[in-house]
C-alpha cells in the first residue's frame, strides 16, 4: 500500500518567516503534485514534479522531488498571510491509473 | 476554459436516503476521479472513470457507485446514507488519467451533511 506522510500537520508562523513542509513515503512515485486548498473549496494544483532531484520554483515557493522519487518538500520564503491554507501533496498511484494518493495535509496559518 | 463544476454545492440528507452528485469536467478531459474528504481521513480516492468505464476503485462499500456519460460528465451515487458519509465530495478531471504525471484539476466540491 502506497502512503504519503506529511509533516508538520499544523504550522502557525508570523509574516516574513520561512517554512518547509515535508512529504515522505517508502514507495516510489512516478510523479508528485502539490495542491493548496482553502476552506470550502477544492484543491488547486500548484506544481507537478516528475524527475528525481527536480526543483521547481513558483514565486516564493520552491518544490523539490527527492532523488529516489520517494519524498518531496515545499519551501516558502517570506510567508505572507495570503499563503494561509491547507497544503497537500499527492502521488500518482501505481500502474496506469487515475488515482492520486494524498498526504494528510499541512494547515498553514500566517499571521500578519 | 471553464473549470470543473460540481452540483449541488451543498446538500443535507437524512440517514437511509440516497443522493446523487454531479460533475462536469474541463472540456476535453476524459478522466474523472472522485474523492471523499473528511477531517479525520483526509482525501480518499473513491473511483475513476475514463471513457464511460470505471478504471479504478478505492476501498469504499458498494453503497458508493458512479457512472460517466459519453460527454465525460460523471455522477456519483451514495445509497442508504450513514452519518459517517458526511464529507466534502470532490471531483477531479484530467486529460487522460494514468499518465506518468497525473495532473488532476479539482472542482469546488459538494458538501454533504447526513443528519
Image (tube, rainbow, N blue to C red):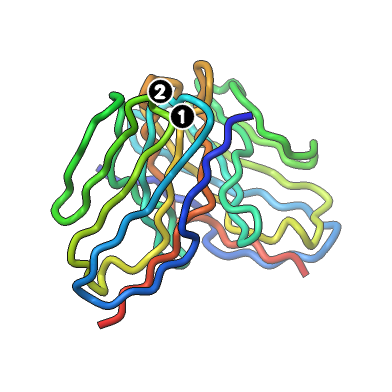
Query: What residue did someone put label 2 on?
Result: A30
Q: Residue at the location (79% across, 36% down)? A: B62
Q: Quadrant of the C terminus of chain A?
A: bottom left
Numbered disc 2: what chain? A
Numbered disc 1: what chain? A
Query: What residue did someone put label 1 on?
Result: A92
* Mark 2 → mark 1, Cα distance in angstroms: 6 Å
Label 1 environment density (alpha carbons within 10 Å; few <14, some 14–19, many ≥20): many
Q: In the displayed structure, does residue B13 sit left or right of residue A4?
A: right
Q: Residue furthest top?
A: A96
Residue B56 in percent (x, y) is at 61, 25
Q: Nearer the viewer, residue A13 or A97?
A: A13
Residue A63 in percent (x, y) is at 26, 43
Q: In the displayed structure, does residue A86 sit left or right of residue A25?
A: left
Q: Quadrant of residue B95?
A: top left
Assign a secondary structure to mark 2: loop
Q: For the residues labelled 2 and 1, say whether their Cβ atoms are less than 8 Å apart.
A: yes
Q: Nearer the viewer, residue A58 or A22?
A: A22
Above or below, comparing residue A71 to residue A76 in the picture: above
Assign a secondary structure to mark 1: strand
The verdict on a common chain for dots 2 and 1 is yes
Above or below, comparing residue A107 to residue B106 in the picture: below
Residue B94 in percent (x, y) is at 39, 31
Q: Residue furthest bottom?
A: A112
Q: Quadrant of the N terminus of chain A?
A: top right
Q: Which mark is residue A24?
A: none
Amino acid at each position: 500500500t502506497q502512503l504519503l506522510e506529511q509533516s508538520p500537520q499544523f504550522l502557525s508562523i508570523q509574516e516574513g518567516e520561512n517554512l518547509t513542509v515535508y512529504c515522505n513515503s517508502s514507495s516510489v512515485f512516478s510523479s508528485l503534485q502539490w495542491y493548496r486548498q482553502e476552506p470550502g473549496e477544492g484543491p488547486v494544483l500548484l506544481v507537478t514534479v516528475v524527475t528525481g532531484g527536480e526543483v521547481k520554483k513558483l514565486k516564493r515557493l520552491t518544490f523539490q522531488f527527492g532523488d529516489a522519487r520517494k519524498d518531496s518538500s515545499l519551501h516558502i520564503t517570506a510567508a505572507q498571510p495570503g499563503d494561509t491554507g491547507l497544503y497537500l501533496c499527492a502521488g500518482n498511484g501505481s500502474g496506469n491509473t487515475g488515482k492520486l494518493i494524498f498526504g494528510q495535509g499541512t494547515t498553514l496559518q500566517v499571521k500578519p | 476554459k471553464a473549470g470543473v463544476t460540481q452540483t449541488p454545492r451543498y446538500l443535507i440528507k437524512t440517514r437511509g436516503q440516497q443522493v446523487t452528485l454531479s460533475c462536469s469536467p474541463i472540456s476535453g478531459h476524459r478522466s474523472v476521479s472522485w474523492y471523499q474528504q473528511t477531517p479525520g481521513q483526509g482525501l480518499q480516492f473513491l473511483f475513476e472513470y475514463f471513457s464511460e468505464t470505471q478504471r479504478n476503485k478505492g476501498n469504499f462499500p458498494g453503497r458508493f457507485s458512479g457512472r460517466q456519460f459519453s460527454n465525460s460528465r460523471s455522477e456519483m451515487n451514495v445509497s442508504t446514507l450513514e452519518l459517517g458519509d458526511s464529507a466534502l465530495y470532490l471531483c477531479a478531471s484530467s486529460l487522460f488519467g494514468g499518465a506518468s504525471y497525473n495532473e488532476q484539476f479539482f472542482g469546488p466540491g459538494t458538501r454533504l451533511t447526513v443528519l
